[in-house]
Image (spheres, grey):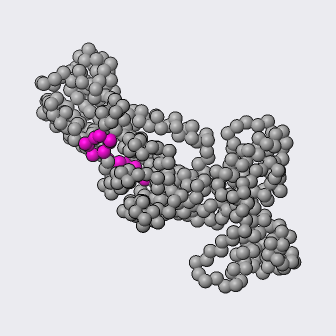
Amino acid sequence: MKLKVLVIEDDDLLRQLIIQHLGNLNYEADGVSRWNQVQNYLEKYEPSLILTDARLPDANSLEYIGKLAESYPVIVLTAFGSVRDAVAAIKAGAADYLLKPVSLDTLSLTVKRVLENAALRRDHQFCKRQLQQSNQRNSSLVGSSEALAKVRQLIDAVAPNDITVLVQGESGSGKELVARAIHNHSHRKKNNFVTVDCCTLQENLFESELFGHEKGAFTGADKQKQGLIEGADGGTLFLDEIGEINASGQAKLLRILETGQYRRLGGTKDLNANVRVIAATNRDLESMSAEDTFRSDLFFRLNAFNITVPPLRERRDDIPSLANHFLKNHNFSTRVNKTLSSSAIRSLVSYNWPGNIRELKNMIERSIILSGDRQKIRPEHFTFSQNGSGRDDIVSLNFAHDPTLDELEAHYLECQLKKYSGRRAVVAKVMGVSERSVYRMIKRYKLDE
């Protein structure tokens, strides 16, 4: 998408020369010759940069640069040798100045530098937050289970394409990690990944935070504020728990997905949203749309590409890797290099984790504290909830076809071996057969491979 540049210059020949040169540099340049035309232009458009003559026939531009610079980077064109104008422009807030007659090479370099600096300033407020968040959570997907491998395949497939993605899964299952992985494997990875937590924002603040607002849009709006969409410009906008937004927010979000345009709260100008949208939810949006509690047209837009993150109980193979990962990467210091005992790992694998990865992370960090100076973490250092323990009897066998008895037996045996960390005596007791029978079935179905 081309960046828009406004050229304010009363010399027709110079104005056209600058516009033509900027066009050759792949900018979208417009020109005006009077200050009263500037006001009309800015009511309709929002340029990325303004080049203005220091003095116009109907106004002294230097008097207005401070106000312009609040919203746009400004480069001032001033007569050769007019140092006073140049100094006044910089003091007023101009990003740079150019001396007339304008050198086209200098113009090219100055415009590029000012736009790059403006982008850096926009990014700064988000960089600090991203750094803080990166210290609190790891953005990698840990594990080698078949269920996680399927998720990685979907990420690799969709990441290079700028299509909207809906990530579904239980709370704490790692939906944001999947969204970050999509961003990190896309062409937008060098730009911001901005998270909007739709649960925590009040209804009357959601639109202001997401879209921004104009001065005077509501009581207390004493100046213009850019929204999170502008903060994510060129990058990815992650809408966490999208099922929680109200009807008004749904309608405006739908407009962004359909047209790529939006308006700030209280604004009249259409702004372009150069973002990729990834949404996540732990709710059944399809059922909600059937019940008219969520817009069906928005659901279909969001559901252009769907990734379902499996709960932790369906990827037990990953639990030891995840537990050791959290053990080595917790965000507080201890004097002892902790390890998990075999019995501790078995107890973790056999638990059903209703809170998923988030619960496992909290459990490991709690056990680090409770184990004190002991090097080994044991089962007694864990505190399992009744919700997780009460789901031990639930067994889910899923097939894409009508399975044979052998397939059912093999799959059931594999689930029990994973659940009880390969302890054949325990599996035999659960299945009501001898340990020798379990051994024979393992050989028969080649589960020892």
For the stretch drawn in magenta, the main secondary structure is loop
Residue at (69%, 71%) from the top-left corner?
395
- In this image, 440 relative to 180: left or right? right
Determine whether 49 is above or below 176 in the image.
Answer: above
Q: Could you tell me if residue 335 is visible in this image?
A: yes
Q: Residue furthest top?
A: 84
Which of 83/51 is in front?
51
Which of 397/64 is in front?
397
Where residue 11 appears, as percent x and y from the top left, is: 13, 30
Tell me the quarter of the picture where residue 347 sits: bottom right
Q: Could you tell me if residue 233 is visible in this image?
A: no
Question: In which quadrant is the C terminus drawn?
Answer: bottom right
Where residue 377 appears, as percent x and y from the top left, is: 81, 48
Which range is magenta? 263-277
Residue at (53%, 40%) from the top-left corner?
130
Where residue 264 appears, as percent x and y from the top left, is: 32, 42
Determine whether 32 is above or below 192 in the image.
Answer: above
Which of 320/2 is in front?
320
Where residue 438 appears, as percent x and y from the top left, is: 82, 76
Residue at (16%, 29%) from the top-left corner?
35
Residue at (84%, 39%) from the top-left corner?
373
Magenta stretch holds residue 161: no
